[in-house]
Image (cartoon, rainbow, N blue to C red):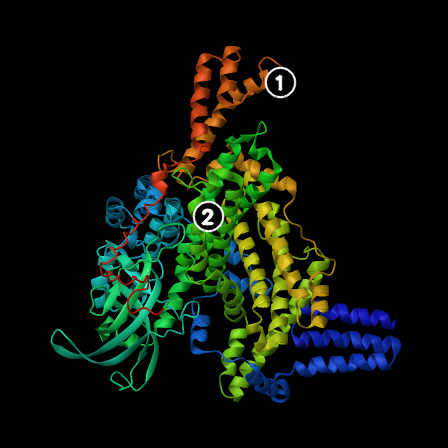
Amino acid sequence: MTLFFFLSAIVLLIFCAYSQLSLMVTGVLFSVLTLLLLMVDGFGIVSGIFILVCAGILLLAQPHLRKEYLSRSVFSWFRKVLPDISQTEQEAIDAGTVWWDGELFTGKPNWKKILTLPEPTLTDEEQAFIDGPVVELCRMMDNWNINHNLAVIPPKTLKFIKDKGFLGMIIPKEYGGLGFSGTAQAEVLKRIAVTGGCTSIFIGVPNSLGPGELLIKYGTEEQKDHYLPRLADGTDVPCFALTGPLAGSDATSLPDVGIVCKGEIDGQEVVGIKLNFEKRYITLAPVATVIGLAFQLNDPDHLIGDKDEYGITCALIPRKTKGIRIGRRHKPIGDAFINGPIFGKDVFIPLDYIIGGAAMAGMGWTMLVNCLSVGRCITLPSIGNGMSKQMLMGTSAYAAVRQQFGLPIAKFEGVQKPLARIAGYSYISNAACLHTIQSLSYGEKPSVASAILKYHVTEMSRQCVVDAMDIHGGKSIMTGPKNYVADPYSSVPILITVEGANIMTRNLMIFGQGATRSHPYVLKEMQLAKQDISEETVSQFDEAFFGHIGFSMSNAARSFLLGLAGSLLTNNPGHHSLETYYRDIDRLSAAFALVADISMLSLQSTLKFREMLSARLGDLLSYLFMASMVLKHYENQGCPKDEFPLVKWSMAHLTYSYQSALEEILQNYPNRFLALKLRWLVFPLGKPYRPPHDTLDTEVANLFTNNTELRQRYLADVFSENTANNPAGQANHVFLQYDLLKPLFKKIIDAVKAGVIPKKIGKQQIEAAQAAKVITAAEAKKLLAYDRQLMDIIHVDHFEQKELVRAQPAARKKPAAKQAPTKKAPLKSNIAEGESQ
């Protein structure tokens, strides 16, 4: 009987936590159970324990007693243990808005908030731009020539880019720009990714974090009227100078200083800023006509206010301003995108060069992180998405037509595995990009989601290129105009590194910012902890703190019960084929919220420095987010059956990756007792998720190595024209020809099997079939034409020695014995004058 009542009490408390019942209701229900125990067993030790628990719950349910005798003390303790947050950290936390990431932190996501959002669409004007100037630009591009001969965009192409408004997609129409939505910008960048990094980054950067976006959001009317029309039509080319030798990922530690002082401009003495700075890695710097500059602003003489230090400030400075040295270039790996250093020595500028005017002095970091929360989810993820799709198109086509051992290499499981991974990663990236970027149209600034996209989409694009390299084999390691893998393979680290290096993004930003910004209670508690203790703050803290406790207990109960019930306790908000996946995300969301809360509570301020643990917690959030986007995308597509294998592969990969990351968290958890309890709560019946099955890999690979409707539909936004400068398009054209000629090839194969003709290869096999009248002369002509095209894409480029070997310097003649030695010219350093060694 005692065991029965103990079990009943546990079940009751779990039920109350799962249902998120109030303390008062829980206390009343427990009182009823306690009375039943007294009636059955009388008063004793067990009933005494029940009475104490019941009394404790009912006392906690009294707000005035709780606040006075408990919450006030907890509030004092909390203010002491809360880690210090710098102003720059606080500004980063405050940047952007909370979107779907906030729902995942609740442990009980409201699917209506995302499933009811409409499908991403383009206006007629945006679609016409994509069908017209974007396609025309892709036709013009010669990526090999740009990367390996010119190192710049040809003048004719550059003029086309400027004339058609590519640099002004972000700029409103009233200033002469195109005024495109984030979705349209992403679609343009995704398509032009096939043109290479030099062009796509040249177009992407002015439409991302830089002078244009900063002016639109923070510029004065005079600044907007002057610069935006010039940026829109390409009269001015912008760059933004933030990174320096001593301030890379730690961008807030800028050593570049601007001192408010008096100086002379146009013969008149004015109050301005004297700047000294050294910047590097600045994209478009060598060709920029206007420089966005971030620097620390100091006012020792209090000429503009009563502060000595204002902090990070952003200004817009014409290239020709006295004291600026610009024009030298770095030489990035892979694509020849334009990048270089900028130096400034005693550069004097007026105060109205500050973006937003003098009133925005010291607001630079706030401006940057707010713009980054939008721009970071468009430019680099879109380019990475386009790169993955290009690898999928070219690699699937090549694998289908390239034969070894008498079979297309697409028939080998060793090729099907990486090919399925390319397809799956591309699908996940595409879904995540489309729907996150679409949220911008509703006023969202998804800072955490943009960090997830930046890290995972670029990392998946890197893996797609690696897999493409492996599948193409020798063809991919010989560079030349025919190779569409080598340059992306070399240049993909650029996507990984810029706009927040991926190591920093994963280890510090995704969970570090998300845990504070997206959590339903943490930010409120932190804000209260900065305030003095008063009746009002104690009351607000009491509400937040006990709400947080109830939230954590609810997620513990939900995680345990959903783990036991196989997620069957949740509802299916979408298509019946996705029911299991919605339930999985509900279950794993509860587990994530629980582990995140326990980690923040037990590790407190030390969690900030346990980057490996924080990174894995960020992985949990990221996998849940991307899985949600996959389901949203499939629902928007109308749940076509032929696309379901891609959804199945994506969800298997993401849930298994989540499980692996959570297992690594528990294996490395500092508190082993808590790790054991957490494992019992989140995996009560063991680990249920498995990676994609081999048969699923084969099924997904076959979707793209055959000319299926899905392949045609999914790759419709990749530039696939069979042009001289589009080798991936050439491979795809041969693949489509092969699909049309399959019946003829089958005739030959059947004839070989029947012994009518001997087994041969390529052209010889076709000629043998014609001689034996297995195929007609007209059919042979088609097959021979196909064979020539096939051999053209199989062949790799080769060059004359003189094209590759650089001329050696002529040997110096020794001076005559009696001749005085000539004075040697000093060696020219590759370090520019004035630059630190």
- The residue pinned by badge 2 equals 489
In the current view of this chain or complex, which residue is farthest to the left?
Answer: 267
**Amino acid beneath label 1:** Lys
* Mark 1 surroundings: few (<14), some (14-19) or many (≥20) residues within 10 A: few
Instruction: Report whether 642 appears left or right of 566.
Output: left
Q: Check the image and report above or below for 786 versus 502.
A: above
Give the vertical position of 297 relative to 440 (above or below): below
- Number of the front mark, 2 or 1: 2
Q: Which residue is drawn at 51% across and 68% down?
A: 508
Q: Percent from the top left, x then y, of residue 495?
A: 43, 55
Q: Where does the image place residue 90, in percent across and percent down from the top left?
A: 45, 75
Task: Identify the residue shown where x is 37% and y is 73%.
Answer: 254
Which label was assigned to residue 753? Answer: 1
Q: Is residue 575 visible?
A: no
Quarter of the rendering occupied by the N terminus: bottom right
Q: How crowded is mark 2: few (under 14 residues within 10 Å), some or many (20 or more)?
A: many
| Gap between marks 2 and 1 measured at Cα | 41 Å
| Residue type of the residue flagged with mark 2 | Tyr
Question: Compared to 35, does 589 lie above or below?
Answer: above
Q: In this view, does 33 lie to the left or right of 208?
A: right
- Out of 735 and 535, give the one closest to the viewer: 735
